[in-house]
Image (cartoon, rainbow, N blue to C red):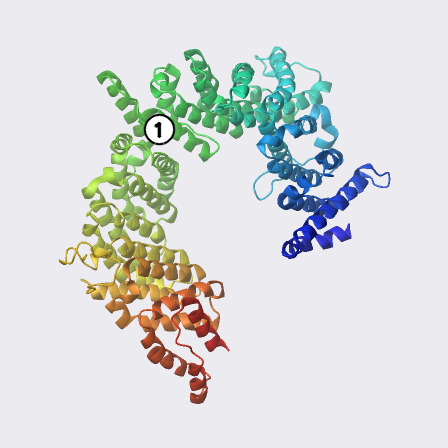
Amino acid sequence: MMMICVSLPCLQLMSFCIEKAHHLTVKIFFVQLYHHTLELLRDVTNSSNYRMDTLDPIFVEKLSELFILLIEQHFWRLEMEPSFSPLDFLTPLYHLTMQLPTVQSYLRCLAVWATFIKQIKPQNAHRYSEVFLELSAALLKKIQFTCNCVQLNQINDTDVDEDNETEWQVFLKTSIEVIAMVAECTPIETFNQVLVPWKISHDIYKHIEQAVDRQNYSLNFEISETERLCYVLKDFSSLTQTLARLSSLFIDQENEDISKPATPLVNSLIEKVLESASLATSVRFYKLKLRESRLIDCFIDIHSQLLAALKTWLIWMTQKDKMSNHNIELIVDITLPILLDGVNVPNKLSHSAAHLLLGFANTVFAQKLVVLPMVVQFIHVAPNMKYSDRKTKCVINSSVSNLLLKPWGELSQNDSMQRNILIGMFFDNLTKEFRELSPNINEGRALDVVDNILPSLSSIIEHCKNYPLASKKLLYIAIKPTIEHALFLLPSFVKYTEISNHMLLFFLNVLGVLQQQLGVDGTKNAVQIFLQVAVSEQQASNLTGLEKLLQILQLVAESPGSSYKTFLPGILQLCMENIYPLIVLHASEAPDVFVALLTLLYSILLHRWQYFYISQVRLGYSPGCSESEVGPDQPQKPEQLLAVLQVFGQALLQPDINIFKLSLIALEDLNAKWKLYHKILFRDHLLSQFLTVLLNCLIDKSQTLLSEDIQVAVYNMAAVNFEGFFSTFLRQFVQNLNGINPSQSEVLLGNFVHNHDKVTNNYNIIFSILI
């Protein structure tokens, strides 16, 4: 084991070195390495000297890494070898995978399988179909409690990792992914493998209804059967999840050899899923009063998995004309009663129902749904429904937005009126409490209302960002009173941190998605209030909310058309006279605000360059001239432009790498697009200062991670006037270096080579300074 652990890191280096040697040497080396590794694998799986449960997990990890490396990089060499037989390798790997006792070791083996399957070319997949099907059959048994309860009961299903997943969830997900990879090679056979045990679990699940006492919310069964029932329900959930994962192989399937036999199988599955989901919603197993809480957890899990599976098959139902009026009503009856129960439903279940509703609203023509009484009822009450998780509420709001705002096609006057009534009713109910807030209300009450309503509304706006203009217009009309009231409240509420954050995020979404609908006048009114708020915050030395305010102003500055001319003077005045002086004093405490200011100024210079420099065409120069070429460069507002550029210089003095990097990138982009470094204003006032700062960074090694980027920037600035750079700037720079006497300065200057080549010049400068 030690040999593998030590030698594995060397393998990649050896691969590189041997690649440089003779081809025959390479081939012999890797073929021999493969055979020795295979012998080791055989010894581990077949020898009586080893017990699987005594294998060190580190050994398994290194062995799997070695196989993955061989397969990923050298499988093509092995296939060319006459003595190579995949079965010789896959057979012991199969035994190792199935016999290892720990989850981590098992997952390592699955990683080898996944790597191997990825290397198989589609035209060669049939050669391995028998092995792959045997693997998927074994994995299906591996994940079922009715087949493998001893091992599965030892897997942790409580503690979560950094991805918020339990060990059981990772185990199941990884197993299902390998089964799905096998299904790509053998879709029908694999689908049938999963479908057979799923039907058995489904039939048992159906019969549970007969044991339910609906009056007493109890389950009539022997306590001794609890364990077995839990196993069946868990397996039903896992197999349902597996079939849902396989849905992508059959949706949009163009190969008739696959789609033709799959159609009756999938249609039968969907009927049974609808049947089970309908039963689950009707009986509400999660409300049963049972001694065993784990049984309730199993009922919740299978119910949510059935809803999730339905969501994955919605597209199939649409493509195969299975979305009949009956099935539409059935899915509505399965989904909405859960959502109408609000906080009385377990979060996992209501979240699955919300996502099913969203998929349903995306798939089914809205007019088919809004004629159903339960759907209309839900639109009425949805704004005021409470759920355990805010994410569920956001998904539901997105679903209703899909129904009401997405195109309905040609509408009669009556249909159009009915739609407008539904839209108005939904958004009025959603925003009613917010629109009733007054500026002098107490902070606690204001926070409760704002926290409940504005995030939901922001989520709807963000969801609608790709909607057509007509839909955005409907949305804007519906929420216009809310936008106006929010602007009215902002100056009073900005002093409350949490409330102002919600409000500014809301305005950020409004301007990002609905600025065109807001119009020039509406935007102008909003900007005036934002500027007023920003000034008041600056006067109070309060950085709270400034980051989002700057992001909002950036959206305004980037708005299409010529309306920006109205806003830029006020925005620039605010940035340079109010915000920048405050940020400079607190740069180390609030680097994100400094980054937001830099981003705004960078955006203004990049997109609104003509605000400072009139285009050559307007100046009367040839229309064929490029504005990016050096040309007439007398700015209209030199003092203001100089002040803006000095902000980028100040950013280069900051220790924060994000601020420094953004400033450097911005300067380089502006030079690439507008020839910034060549402009007279920059050359006369800033060039030598910027060069000095950047070279000092290289000497001090204060921004080591960005040294290459700094070198490029130094070259580009020096390229403005190489002769002046070498003859004047460098001499002054070297003479001002600390710790160097005049004679050393002359020696150092003599080391510089007047070379205009970028790479050579960079290193001549750096080496001359640092040696």
Give the vertical position of 334 relative to 694 (above or below). above
Q: What residue is drawn where x is 65% and y is 19%?
A: 197
Judged from this view, the residue extending furthest toward the bottom is: 743
Splitting the image into 4 quarters, where does residue 643 fall?
bottom left
The one of 724 and 499 positioned closer to us in this rendering: 724
Density class for disc 1 (Cα within 10 Å; few <14, some 14-19, many ≥20) is many
Q: Is residue 14 above or below residue 424?
A: below
Q: Residue at x 31, y 39 (%)?
A: 513
Q: Residue at x 24, y 16 (%)?
A: 414
Query: Is residue 590 visible to the viewer in this orientation of the structure?
Result: no
- Quadrant of residue 425 in the image? top left
Question: Is 235 situated left or right of 630 in this image?
Answer: right
Please provide percent x and percent y for residue 28: 72, 49
Residue position marked by numbered label 1 in the rendering: 401
The secondary element bearing badge 1 is classed as helix
Name the kind of residue labelled 1 in the image.
Answer: Ser
Image x and y of residue 656, in percent: 44, 62
Q: Is residue 633 left or right of residue 297?
A: left
Specify whether residue 756 is in view.
yes
x and y percentages locating residue 317 in the rendered image: 46, 18
Relative placement, left or right, of 665 versus 170 is left
Position of 30 relative to 473 (above/below): below
In the orientation shown, which residue stands out farthest toward the left? Answer: 620
